[in-house]
Amino acid sequence: MDVFELKRSIPVDEGYDIVVAGGGPAGVAAAVSAGRLGLRVLLAEAQNCLGGMGTSGLVSLLGPMSDGTKRLARGFIGEVVDRLYKKGWMAKRPNPF
């Protein structure tokens, strides 16, 4: 039986303040929020894209995130929804929030 040996040299930098495992919605929110606080962040994702099942599984539904009159989504996801809506990447609704 043939045996192949693989070696790789990976330089080590100065490190990170936080390592986030998983680039789904929660992981991305954690990594972005930590970065905004000035922390050095490593976001590690096993798939070839960020976004979790919303991206890799094509399950990209974002609900209205409101009760019809009051906006319920705040923080990072509220910011994402605002940007999607303003760019026209979310369906227009009479009251999106």
Image (cartoon, helix red, strand yellow):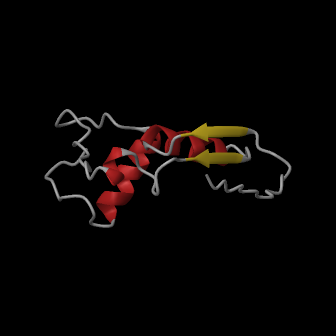
Q: At 28% from the left edge and 63% from the top edge, which residue is drawn?
A: 89
Q: What's the residue at 22%, 43% (across, down)?
A: 64
- Give the x, y percent position of residue 66: 24, 37
Residue located farthest toward the left when viewing the structure as drawn: 94
Quadrant where the C terminus sits is: top left
User: In the depicted view, which residue is nearer to us: 89 or 21?
Assistant: 21
Residue visible at 31% across and 33% down in the picture: 72
Q: Residue at x 26, y 50 (%)?
A: 60
x then y, percent, for residue 57: 29, 49
Residue 68 appears left or right of 60: left
Using the image, determine if residue 83 lies above or below residue 45.
Answer: below
Closer-to-camera residue (97/16): 16
Residue 63 position within the rendered picture, expressed as x and y whole percent measured from the top left: 22, 42
- Percent from the top left, x then y, of residue 74? 40, 38
33 displayed left or right of 47: right
Task: Name the side, left or right, on which 79 lies relative to 28.
Answer: left
Number of callouts: 0
Residue extending furthest toward the bottom: 87
Asked which quadrant contains residue 11, the reply is bottom right
The image shows residue 17, relative to residue 85, as above or below, that is above
Q: Is residue 41 left or right of residue 58?
A: right
